Amino acid sequence: MATFVRPPAVAGRFYPGEPDILRAEVDSYLYGPGKRASVLGCIIPHAGYMYSGHVAGAVYSEINLPSRCILMCPNHTGRGEALSITSDGEWKTPLGNMHIDSDLANALKQKFSFLTEDIEAHRTEHAIEVQLPFLQARNPNLSFVPIALGTVQFEILEALGIAIAEVLSQTADPVLVIASSDMNHYENDSITRVKDGKAIDQILGLNARDLFDVVMKERISMCGFGPSVAMLTATKKLGARHARLLKYATSGDVSGDRNMVVGYAGVIIS
């Protein structure tokens, strides 16, 4: 049977479609080599590179990148399953193909039965895809597990995080848990920075429940708060004690339009 290959959906839009140009742009956002931190998880934005690439690059520059990761994102399209995982095949980018970590994906499905094998949720979703060229630039041999979340039920998100922690606690190799998320959307810069500050405070406190509550109460349109809740739950179960905000920005910093912005935060958990 032929290997499933998920083709790029947003190359040429969110990031360059030509390999040499893409590599050069990704490299322009990376710096080092310096002393890199060993981390359990992180939150990284997923907008077009011109807006959030410098924030994503700050995270990828600062961390030791293992050879395996779990990459969770929101389901922007509404297609497919609410808890969608793909456990076989490869994802293609202009920089080459990245392998899905089948062993890790299958272990997660066995531990958390609500995860559903599904391609449709991932077919046109950008929030994982835009992370891959950064991962390829830092570690071309990395394999990953793609998970798209279309649920906002705290109990489900928490249970997923607990399941991830249980699987990783039995895994010999280090595994990075990435939550792909932008912050507040489409309000003015001042409001966005206040709202994002409230969410970031809870992330830095490693407070998954409080992050969920403040997003709901304050109507913070943080698209990846679900993946962030699951990631925080998992990393705290795995012994995380510290969180650090590496960089924060809004789209207005690039566009100059402060009336309607999106926020971006790069956070590491250790």
Image (tube, helix red, strand yellow):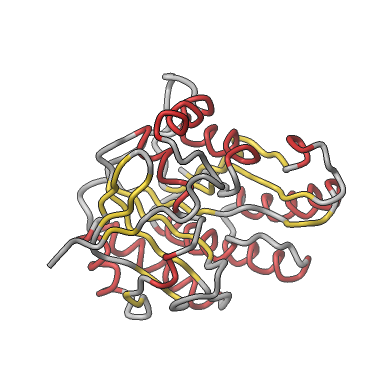
- Could you tell me residue 38's position as x and y percent? 39, 36
- Could you tell me residue 244's position as x and y percent? 57, 39
**Mark count:** 0
- Could you tell me residue 133's position as x and y percent? 41, 40
Instruction: Give the residue at x 57% y 47%.
Output: 45
Instruction: Give the residue at x 23% y 68%.
Output: 106
Residue 89's image quarter?
A: bottom left
Left or right: where does residue 23 sit relative to residue 189? Answer: left
Task: Single out the residue that lies furthest toward the left.
Answer: 1
Left or right: where does residue 185 sit relative to residue 33? Answer: right
Residue 65's image quarter?
A: top left
- Could you tell me residue 191's position as x and y percent? 85, 52
Instruction: Give the residue at x 61% y 48%.
Output: 204
The front one of 161 and 149 is 149
- In this rendering, the answer to whether 30 lies above or below 250 is above
Instruction: Give the residue at x 24% y 63%.
Output: 4
- In this rendering, the answer to whether 128 lies above or below 122 is above
Left or right: where does residue 104 sit relative to residue 95? Answer: left
* The C terminus - image quarter: top left
* The N terminus - image quarter: bottom left
Left or right: where does residue 248 sit relative to residue 79? Answer: right
The front one of 234 and 61 is 61
